[in-house]
Amino acid sequence: EGLATAIIGRPNVGKSSLMNSLVHENKAIVTDIPGTTRDVLEEYVNVRGVPLRLIDTAGIRETEDIVEKIGVERSRKALADAELILFVLNAAEELSKEDEALFEAIQDMNAVVVLNKTDLEITIDTDRVSSLAGERPVIGTSLLREEGIDELEQAIAHLF
Ligand code: GDP
Ligand code: MG
């Protein structure tokens, strides 16, 4: 088993990269094409003594592609069933309406907010992110440079 942990966020923010970083393997396909992860991938991983069942969700977005549509539906279910949420945001973009909607969707849920792509110029409103995160930790990462992963693992372990 393991705590059901949904990795959520808009397409292309780095969800599959995060999955690979935590598993320490390159299993999920990472590309710069939004919509690459169309199905839901699962991996078991032990984060500092905390067993997690990681679920790399397809980006939750409106789509006409039938395979992607099924993936998005499964992502919504993974979110609803999750005991822990890893919510990935792109630090190099403005906070979008979709991000705000996801914050709303995970209200009152156990979550860690991952501000990824900190190697790029940070343009996201970090005060707004902190305020939406509330008590929940916000961790900066550059998954590309393998930075921030220790801090993230520590934050996850600290919650349990
Ligand atoms: P997903 O669609 O959310 O699963 O995102 P992916 O993990 O597939 O990553 C989308 C793109 O962002 C890929 O081209 C990654 O190489 C890139 N990427 C992921 N993490 C970082 C990062 O920390 N910095 C930069 N600059 N690019 C990143
Ligand atoms: Mg992906």
Image: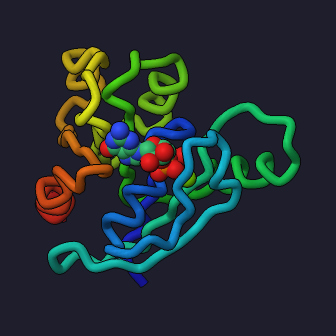
Residue 109 placement (x, y as % from top left) = 36, 45
Q: Horizontal placement of 120 versus 106: left or right?
A: left
Residue 115, placed above or below residue 38: above
Q: Quadrant of the N terminus?
A: bottom left
x then y, percent, for residue 156: 21, 59
Residue at x 67%, y 44% (from the top left corner): 35
Does residue 79 show up? Answer: no
* Residue 12 vertical placement versus 70 (above, below): above
In the figure, residue 123 lies in which quadrant?
A: top left
Indicate the quadrant where residue 32 lies. Answer: top right
- Horizontally, residue 147 falls left or right of residue 17, namely left
Residue located at (17% from left, 51% from top): 148
Residue in the image at 31% along x and 39% along y? 116
Please report the residue visible at 20 percent of the width from the left and 38 percent of the height from the top: 138
Say if residue 155 shows up in the picture: yes
Q: Where's the C terminus, which quadrant?
A: bottom left
Q: Estimate the x, y position of residue 49 in percent, counting from the top left.
A: 17, 80
| Number of dots carrying numbers | 0
Q: Nearer the viewer, residue 113 or 93?
A: 93
Side of 125 relative to 56 (left or right): left
- Residue 76 horizontal/vertical position (percent): 63, 48
Q: How is the image coloured?
A: rainbow
Looking at the image, residue 69 sits to the left or right of residue 122; the answer is right
